[in-house]
Amino acid sequence: MDLQAQTDAVAVLRADLSSGRSVLLTGDAGSGRTAVLEQLRSELTASGRAVVLVRGADAVAEVPLAAFAEVIADHQIAGAAPLAVYTTLPVRVRARGTVVLVDDADALDRASAVLLGQLTRAGTLVAVAVTSPENLPKSVLDEVIHGRWGRLDLAPLGSDDVLRVAAELVGDELAARSAAMVVSLAEGHLSTVVEQVAAVGVLGRGPAGTEVGDPVATPALRRRAKEATRGVGPQAYAALERLALAPELPVGLFAGPVVADLVEAGLVAVEGTSIRQTRPLVGLALRSRWSASERAARLGRLADDLGDWPAWAGTSMLMAVRAGRRISDHLLLDAADVALAAARSQEVTEFLDALDTSSPRERLLRGAVAAAEGDIAAAEEFLRDIDLTAVDDRMRVRVGRVWGLALAVRGADPQRAVRQVTTVLATIGDPVAGRVLETDLVKWRLMAGEQPAGVEVSPTSDDPRVRLDEAVIGAMLASLGGTAPEVLAYVDTGRALVSEIGEVPSSVPALLTLSEYLSVAFDGRVAEAEALASYHRDRAAREADPSLGMWEFAAAELALHRGDLTQADALARRATRHLAWRDFTGLQSTAVALMAAVDARRGRLGAAEDLIEDITDLHTADVKVALHVARTRAERALRSRRRDEAADLLSDAGHTALAHAHLHLALMALDEAFMLDPTDDRAQAVIDQRGLSPLAATLARRVEAVLAGTVAELAPSVDELDGMGFIGRAAHAAQLVSRMHSRAGDPATARKWRSRAVLLTSRCGTVWPPAPDGDALSPRELDIARRAARRERSREIGAALGLSVRTVENHLARIYRKLGIAGRDGLADEVLGEHVTQR
């Protein structure tokens, strides 16, 4: 649980207790329950309430009422018999108005549980924390069910929050593999994040982020694993031991009832014919118990058992290699090919290291792994060592593909990739085989800034792999300037071909899903797009999937367009690190430029300009890089009061993007130019794109209303843009509506719209474009405003936030000024979410 979530949880609990309702707080161990109760106690005490905190962990089975010992002593009934305590203590606690907080209520001894039930029945206000309601003592559970208690469930931390906390602990973003380790073991528990980072330590820092040590089965982690497997039978436990050795295994290897039990317990997942563990901490705890020799013996037995499963030959071979057995070279190469297609570089290297002899195929695979790891010099050395005249067309195609990925994507040099792949293509005699490289060249030329217009992407080959490449290219091109249905047609075709082919590079489905995401986002369905990106980002973070940086970049760029610069900042910085680790989309330079644009819009112009200093014309040939560089330079002009120049920079970049068929990204820049300088020609550039998507149509209507000065037409665009998720543009439109009402002599309505603009801007964190009347509430001011709107007194607010009463009153004065209201009476309407009536 992060600090803001903890603060919000405490506010909810205080509100319930203030209204006379006891509350139940649930959450897994490590979810922050104890921290919430401790902060709640601190705030209640500071506000003058009598509070006691009882800890179930202090219970002692042999000593009845041990957990309540301090409470019993404070109320002068120490030494009394349990029956006297049960009847006397609740009356005295209730009379004093004491609030009783109980942590780990499921660990209370039986006598303490009975006393807690007596306290609740006597009308004492209590806040009880427990893992789940089923673990409550029955006497308390009855009161919860029938006594109309409030309830707050603490959700585990999301992957983004886990990584943010880890970054704070080590002083930098974690590298992808380390990030995956921490995310998968933590399972959203803050305490595990802190414990694991402290246990493994920092190994090194680099462009791809900070690497930490291998995971450690700490005592606390073993306890969680033991709790997770409690009640698991011997056969199911043996199945978990086998699953701890391999990423996944055939489900038929285990008895049906065993699989069913493990699925019901949430310890495994079955996907098709495969089964895998869902809780890596269990596998880590199990492996930590075995010696090296015992582990090798278990791996060997598993390899033998998988020998009866032809489809699992690769996994069988991996187990055998790890057990130290010798395997023939051609089998190892076949297994390495499969592992490479699945982007499992470590497995590829394990297979290659077990070879007895070298060959062109081995050098190709080592080159592909080196390229994936970002070692371009080594990749080139391996590839140049392959004699193209001594291999067949199939091998030449593979060499050409690896050259393209190494130079265009990992080496960020698409122009050189075009030249090298073209050279390889010239050595291929079979035009059908060469079609694969011709399709690749479309991608590399697109990245090199060459015109994509006129590129044929319709299926022309009987080879499903060629048609799959064409579907991916078609989806990518359509996502730049097509409609959502056009993109999804290519995506659906590509996914069908993926199912038909079976083993394909992991980048292929990722690029299809990215195309879908972009089409949904630019269609104005931001919530749907963010859910899609969040799912894939979380999965990639847990599994150290090569698509992690791509998804972080995509979400960061959308956050910029939405106006959420705080989110854009966090994700862009993480994306630059994880793209330095794996990047099959050529986004590294674009991510740096995006980070510069975000820095600039947040007022960090020096940092922004330092970032773009190393961006050359070679990089800005990529339209995406050029757009963000233009945003960065526009901010310098804007802050120097050269608004027209800033708008020109954005407009020029937008028109260049139009010329290169990047229509959606062009629209964003052209609209920003209009927001800075609302002239007829800038408006027309936006209006011309109105048929592109529902978002484009909304922006066009807003532009027309601004030019016409018609508030009745402009006001609806605020709700439309807010509903679509583009809160920055919604806030800007609300500012314009406020000014129109002010000029029309309607100051009351103008103030209402100004409050709406301020609150929208507060959700973004930053006003853009900067405006004298566009102040946002800071996070601290927003917190104070919400508390004041809930009728908390200044003294209570100050106690909760560690501020003096005078400081709280000063904050409130600034809040009233920004919202254009007279005092607290206006806060409930403005801050608690009531929208302005359109007029």
Image (cartoon, helix red, strand yellow):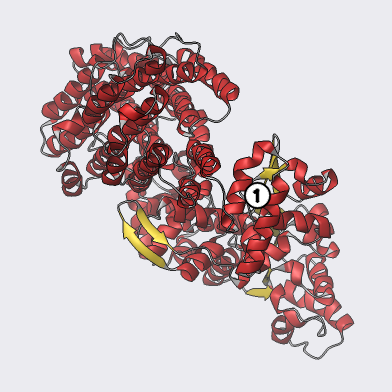
138 horizontally vs 227: left or right = right
* Amino acid identity at mark 1: Thr
Residue at 65% across, 52% down: 153
Taking depth in this image into account, of 767 and 772 the one nearest to the observer is 767
| 338 relative to 730, above or below | below
Taking depth in this image into account, of 178 and 292 the one nearest to the observer is 292
Task: Point out the image quarter for the C terminus.
Answer: top left
278 horizontally vs 706: left or right = right
The residue that disc 1 covers is 278
Q: Position of residue 413 (x, y in %)?
A: 23, 33
Tag 1 secondary structure: loop
Taking depth in this image into account, of 586 and 3 the one nearest to the observer is 586
| 652 relative to 267, above or below | above
Query: Residue 671 appears in which quarter of the rendering?
Result: top left
Q: Is residue 671 visible?
A: no
Query: Residue 643 appears in which quarter of the rendering?
Result: top left
Q: Is residue 633 visible?
A: yes
396 horizontally vs 825: left or right = left
Q: How many neighbours does mark 1 have within 10 angstroms: few (below 14), some (14-19), or many (20 or more)?
A: some
Q: Position of residue 687 (x, y in %)?
A: 30, 11
| 412 relative to 239, above or below | above
Identify the residue at the far bottom of this view: 79
Q: Position of residue 761 (x, y in %)?
A: 36, 38
Query: Residue 99 appears in which quarter of the rendering?
Result: bottom right
Residue at 35% across, 14% down: 701
Taking depth in this image into account, of 10 and 190 the one nearest to the observer is 190
328 horizontally vs 282: left or right = left
Residue at 48% across, 49% down: 355
Identify the residue at the far right of this view: 83
Q: Position of residue 758 (x, y in %)?
A: 36, 38
